Image: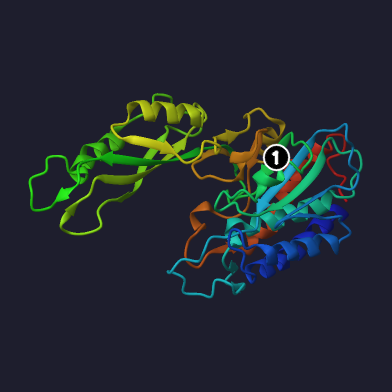
């Protein structure tokens, strides 16, 4: 075994031990101080000058050249709350039958520690084509202001990014954006005992049918059509009173054929109710199928696809590739897990993907 494989395997095994520590440390969005400390200590103990901004931890490779473009390696260390379906302790990093169980193991701890291992493998390299920035960020799960979006003003200018999320190490070259709308169906309040032809709850029936049947014209070859889903409705506070309004929430997943502003303008003009977008900043994102990173992945036998789920890609303005170990269908599920085999192979695949991109003159030199 050559020294480069020995090096990446060493960092991989150390990263898996870190993942176990991260699982055992609660890190709900906005409450990631403990995991930020672990990540910071892991890097500094290996000679890296690691920086903190809130619960975000970031670092650059040793030989930074301001004249070179920058590649961001990013994933998050916050988690959702464990759901009620858990039969295991979500904070117990237990290995059973080749699976590492625990909250955040799959989403996105596996991707995060794999990228950290890769960062270490390239950390001392000279003459890379790009500077490297590693960012282990907070508040991804709630799209909070103190995560990557708040860190971008501190980081060097980013030219291209790999965002670590569970994709089975396939290449997610596009990702849908998100706009959440608050809607109001107006009516007339009254006592339930009296006639009322303007009950907003009945008025909501054709509105719900309208959302169910509405279609946007532009369909993406990677992401498919824009998807509209009514996810919440609320009206009334007591059995004998007709409310004046019904409130609904509409979740819209946006392909790259539209900006979020275009989606908002079209729905507000066409919808048979009042709609107010909560935010327009989570646009669709992606990378050209001809980008060198994508071509490098294809040469390794990886496949490309469009991802329906949202990640921190949405706050990046540069080309970005979503890629990581694990399976998105396990995310936010009960008894979340990731296979040890996935954790062992991911850093090596990342290195094979990045070496011709970062060191085109010498694909064999690492460390």
Q: Residue at x 81, y 59 (%)?
A: 43
Q: Secondary structure at mark 1?
A: strand
In the rendered image, the vertical position of residue 244 relative to residue 25, given as above or below: above
Q: Residue at x 44, y 31 (%)?
A: 264
Using the rendered image of the protein, determine whether residue 153 is visible from the camera's viewpoint. Answer: yes
Colouring scheme applied when the structure was drawn: rainbow
Q: Is residue 42 left or right of residue 212?
A: right
**For this rendering, which residue is in front, 175 or 277?**
277
Q: Quadrant of the N terminus?
A: bottom right
**For this rendering, which residue is in front, 149 or 43?**
149
Question: Mark 1 highlights which residue?
Answer: 161
Q: Residue at x 58, y 60 (%)?
A: 79
Q: Residues within 10 Å of mark 1 (few under 14, many from 20)?
A: many
Q: Is residue 198 left or right of residue 214?
A: left
**For this rendering, which residue is in front, 40 or 355?**
40
Q: Is residue 328 left or right of residue 210?
A: right
The percent position of residue 239, horizontal first and vertical second, equals 17, 59
Using the rendered image of the protein, determine whether residue 219 is visible from the camera's viewpoint. Answer: no
Q: How many marks?
A: 1
Location of residue 138 (image quadrant)? bottom right
Q: Is residue 355 left or right of residue 299?
A: right
Location of residue 27 (image quadrant)? bottom right
The percent position of residue 117, horizontal first and vertical second, equals 77, 56
The percent position of residue 295, horizontal first and vertical second, equals 68, 33
The percent position of residue 135, horizontal first and vertical second, equals 73, 50
Q: Residue at x 51, y 32 (%)?
A: 222
């Amino acid at each position: 075994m050559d020294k480069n494989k020995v090096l990446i395997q060493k960092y991989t095994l150390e990263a898996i031990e870190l993942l176990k520590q991260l699982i055992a440390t609660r890190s709900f969005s906005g409450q990631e101080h403990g995991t930020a400390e672990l990540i910071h200590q892991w890097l500094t103990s290996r000679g890296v000058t690691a920086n903190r901004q809130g619960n975000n931890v970031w670092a650059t490779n040793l030989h930074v050249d301001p004249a070179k473009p920058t590649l961001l390696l990013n994933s998050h260390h916050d988690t959702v709350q464990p759901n009620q379906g858990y039969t295991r302790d979500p904070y117990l990093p237990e290995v059973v039958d080749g699976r590492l169980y625990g909250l955040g193991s799959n989403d996105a701890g596996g991707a995060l520690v794999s990228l950290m291992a890769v960062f270490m493998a390239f950390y001392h390299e000279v003459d890379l084509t790009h500077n490297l920035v590693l960012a282990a960020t907070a508040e991804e799960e709630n799209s909070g202001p103190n995560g990557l979006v708040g860190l971008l003003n501190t980081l060097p200018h980013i030219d291209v990014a790999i965002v670590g999320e569970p994709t089975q190490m396939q290449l997610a070259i596009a990702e849908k954006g998100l706009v959440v709308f608050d809607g109001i169906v107006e009516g007339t309040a009254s006592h339930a005992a009296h006639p009322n032809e303007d009950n907003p709850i009945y008025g909501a029936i054709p509105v719900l049918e309208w959302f169910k049947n509405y279609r946007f014209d532009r369909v993406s070859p990677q992401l498919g059509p824009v998807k509209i889903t009514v996810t919440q409705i609320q009206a009334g506070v007591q059995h004998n009173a007709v409310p004046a309004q019904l409130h609904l929430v509409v979740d819209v997943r946006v392909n790259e054929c539209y900006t979020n502003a275009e989606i908002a303008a079209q729905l507000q003009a066409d919808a048979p109710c009042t709609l107010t977008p909560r935010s327009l900043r989570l646009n669709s994102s992606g990378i050209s199928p001809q980008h060198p990173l994508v071509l490098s992945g294809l040469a390794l036998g990886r496949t490309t696809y469009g991802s329906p789920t949202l990640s921190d890609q949405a706050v990046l303005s540069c080309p970005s590739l979503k890629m990581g170990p694990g399976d998105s269908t396990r995310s936010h599920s009960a008894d979340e897990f990731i296979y040890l085999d996935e954790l062992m192979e991911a850093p090596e695949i990342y290195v094979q993907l990045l070496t011709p991109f970062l060191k085109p003159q010498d694909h064999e030199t690492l460390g």
